[in-house]
């Protein structure tokens, strides 16, 4: 059996949510967001293993919640790091080296679909690296900071929208490629905002599969309202 591992970094504090509770533990449909997201990923039968990294103090709580989630496959909880990259690296260190594909998915991106995951796995098998992304709708400006108020910047260039996509997760990679990308980043002291950027540093092409606006990342309080709206829409659509 080809092993497909899914890593979910869940060690963030979620300060932009305006709550003392980390956003991955806010409840959607009566369960923590991280559990909701895991269940959605578990709908993809190709995934064989889950690895979740969280703050050390939250490990027992998360282990208990995951044990009750009924994922139907192994799920390990690792200690997270101070950055997303460290958290993913800690989880990646626990992945069996015989694993074929590794997915990395935001713990607070709860509406990914099995079809999207299956497509990413297929692209990662064929090409080595693939992510979900959506085209930019707004005009994109490159700016530079000057001796201005903090909320003011100066435009230095306008970037054609056809050259821009907004990266989403999951991001999928052959195991050895992702391992090498993390090793190289550690050697060079480089920190990136996503895994694709680390793979790009190796000179390897990363391909973009069309994602969805519904595959939102819960970042602000209004995102929770939108998530509840999407969930209600799903229930209405599912009714006979």
Image (cartoon, rainbow, N blue to C red):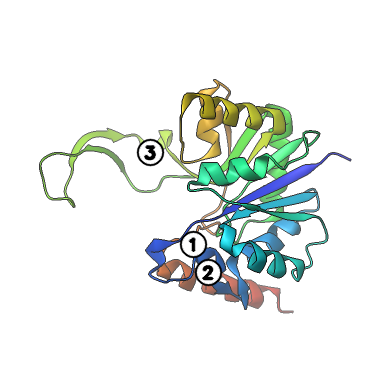
Left or right: 207, with 45 as reference point: left
Eye-nearest disc, 2 or 3: 2
Image: 154 above or below 36 = above
Image: 184 above or below 109 = above
Tell me if I can see residue 133 in this picture.
no
Quadrant for residue 140, please give it: top left
From the top left corner, tell me how far across and down residue 157 is, in percent.
24, 33
Query: What residue lies at 46% left-to-right and 36% top-to-bottom?
Result: 192
Looking at the picture, tell me which residue is in the foreground, 109 or 185: 185
Quote the CA–CA distance across marks 2 and 3: 27 Å
Tell me if I can see residue 81 in this picture.
yes
Left or right: 115, with 149 as reference point: right
Left or right: 116, with 203 as reference point: right
From the top left corner, tell me how far across and down residue 42 is, in percent.
75, 58
Callout 3 secondary element = helix
| Residue that carries the numbered disc 2 in the rendered image | 227
Eye-nearest disc, 3 or 1: 1
Quote the CA–CA distance across marks 3 and 1: 24 Å
Q: The N terminus appears in which quarter of the rendering?
A: top right
Callout 1 secondary element = loop
Q: Residue 218 carries which label?
A: 1
| Residue that carries the numbered disc 3 in the rendered image | 161
Looking at the picture, tell me which residue is in the foreground, 11 or 4: 11
Eye-nearest disc, 2 or 1: 1
Quadrant for residue 215, please give it: bottom right
Question: As drawn, which residue projects farthest toward the right?
Answer: 1
């Amino acid at each position: 059996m080809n092993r497909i591992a899914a890593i979910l970094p869940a060690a963030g504090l979620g300060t932009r949510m305006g709550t003392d509770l980390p956003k991955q533990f806010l409840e959607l449909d009566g369960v923590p967001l991280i559990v909701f997201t895991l269940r959605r990923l578990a709908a993809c039968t190709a995934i064989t293993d889950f690895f979740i990294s969280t703050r050390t103090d939250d490990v027992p709580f998360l282990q208990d919640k995951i044990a009750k989630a009924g994922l139907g496959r192994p799920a390990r909880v690792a200690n997270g790091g101070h950055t997303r990259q460290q958290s993913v690296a800690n989880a990646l260190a626990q992945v069996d080296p015989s694993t074929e594909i590794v997915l990395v998915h935001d713990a607070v991106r709860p509406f990914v679909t099995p079809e999207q995951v299956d497509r990413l796995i297929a692209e990662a098998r064929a090409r080595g690296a693939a992510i979900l992304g959506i085209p930019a709708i707004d005009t994109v400006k490159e700016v530079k900071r000057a001796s201005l108020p903090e909320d003011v910047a100066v435009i230095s260039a306008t970037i054609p929208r056809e050259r821009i996509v907004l990266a989403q997760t999951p991001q999928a990679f052959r195991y050895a490629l992702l391992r090498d990308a993390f090793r190289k980043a550690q050697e060079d002291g480089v920190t990136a905002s996503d895994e694709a950027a680390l793979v790009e540093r190796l000179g390897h092409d990363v391909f973009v599969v069309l994602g969805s606006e519904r595959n939102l990342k819960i970042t602000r309080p209004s995102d929770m309202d939108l998530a509840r709206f999407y969930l209600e829409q799903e229930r209405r659509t599912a009714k006979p």
